[in-house]
Amino acid sequence: MIDARLSLALDGGGLSWPLDGRIAVFQPTTAAALMGVPKDRAQILQGFRPDYDAWVTCGYDCAVAPEGRYAAALVALPRSKAEARAMIAETMQCVDGPVVVDGQKTDGVDSILRDMRKRCAVEGPISKAHGKLFWVNAADPQAFADWVAGPALTDGGFWTAPGVFSADAVDPASALLIEALPEKPGKRIADLGAGWGYLSAHLLARPGVEEVHLVEAGHMALECARHNVTDPRAQFHWADATSWRPDDKLDAVVMNPPFHTSRTADPGLGQAFMHAAAQVLHAQGQLWMVANRHLPYEATLQTLFAKVTEIGADRRFKLFQASRPLRKRG
């Protein structure tokens, strides 16, 4: 979708890249081909580890944050309006030429376009495939100073950032899971999909815990977790939780796995977390997890663990304990 709009803009639509210099591409999904961006001049700025790895595999120069100055930039809008604003403000601080903004209507591109027109001259837009692309050729970075946002301390006493899951308050599913955990969950534990570190912080307050591995694919979320979890027993891993493996098998896994891909419910994502949990636990290891009530996870857990028990629930969530992962015989 971004490729169709970008092609129209570059092919007679009035947009052109500078003749030289690097082009920053902020947070593109792997669905984008970026055919209109010279590959040898592009740097992909992507904080989601699976997408970062995919772009590296495609041969792109990648980073998680801007590195120096750029001649131009292409911003792929995220769903979060606060995150989108922060990304645009960051872009304006490090780009000398055109800043191109692209997004779907469902991701709020019309609202961002209206807001930007109040602050600077905007070219375009190009409308196609239920989205819009527009650009700014010259803008005062100070015009977007109030959009700047990053990790910050909330009124609740924890650090979060725009776009991070449960940025405004403790997620109720995670709070429910903490209440259900035993006093001594184990010595070596992994928090898969650790987010900004709520579960891990509570685990480290339990007796007998020797190490907690915070595994999180979102780079910004993990940076927030580093602020929230300062215990030396914590180990931080910017990694895809579905493929991460520890050096040695673990006693326990706790998790509140994601269940959405973009706006679409995807039970397969949570199921992939369960498979990962079974792989990282030792023979007597235990998994504690929370899930939305409507998700069909019980059958998957029963194929992966010798014992599966529902240990609690409310009208929105259900809690599971699973123990003794089953090993496939080859």
Image (cartoon, rainbow, N blue to C red):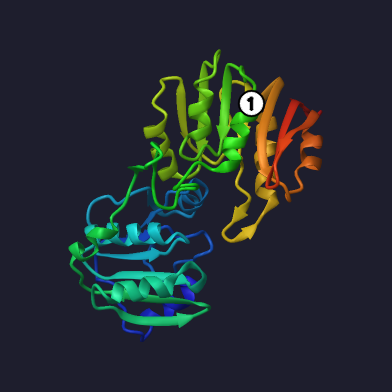
On the image, the x and y values in percent for residue 14 come to: 31, 83
State the count of labels: 1
On the image, the x and y values in percent for residue 98 come to: 26, 71
On the image, the x and y values in percent for residue 1 come to: 51, 73
Which quarter of the picture shows residue 136? bottom left
Q: Is residue 42 visible?
A: no
Of residues 300 and 177, which is closer to you in this image? 177
Q: Residue furthest top?
A: 208
The residue positioned 53% from the left and 32% from the top of the image is 199
The residue positioned 55% from the left and 39% from the top of the image is 193
Q: Is residue 161 visible?
A: yes
Q: Is residue 176 left or right of residue 220?
A: right
Of residues 170 and 131, which is closer to you in this image? 170
Of residues 138 and 196, which is closer to you in this image? 196
Q: Residue under label 1, please give it.
A: 181
The residue positioned 28% from the left and 78% from the top of the image is 122
On the image, the x and y values in percent for residue 163 come to: 44, 52
Disc 1 marks a residue whose amino acid type is Leu
Which quarter of the picture shows residue 286? top right
On screen, residue 170 above or below 118: above
Q: Is residue 215 left or right of residue 152?
A: right
The residue positioned 50% from the left and 52% from the top of the image is 51
Of residues 191 and 183, which is closer to you in this image? 183
Bin the neighbour count of mark 1 within 10 Å (Cα to Cα): few under 14, some 14-19, many 20 and up.
Answer: some
Quadrant position of the C terminus in the picture? top right
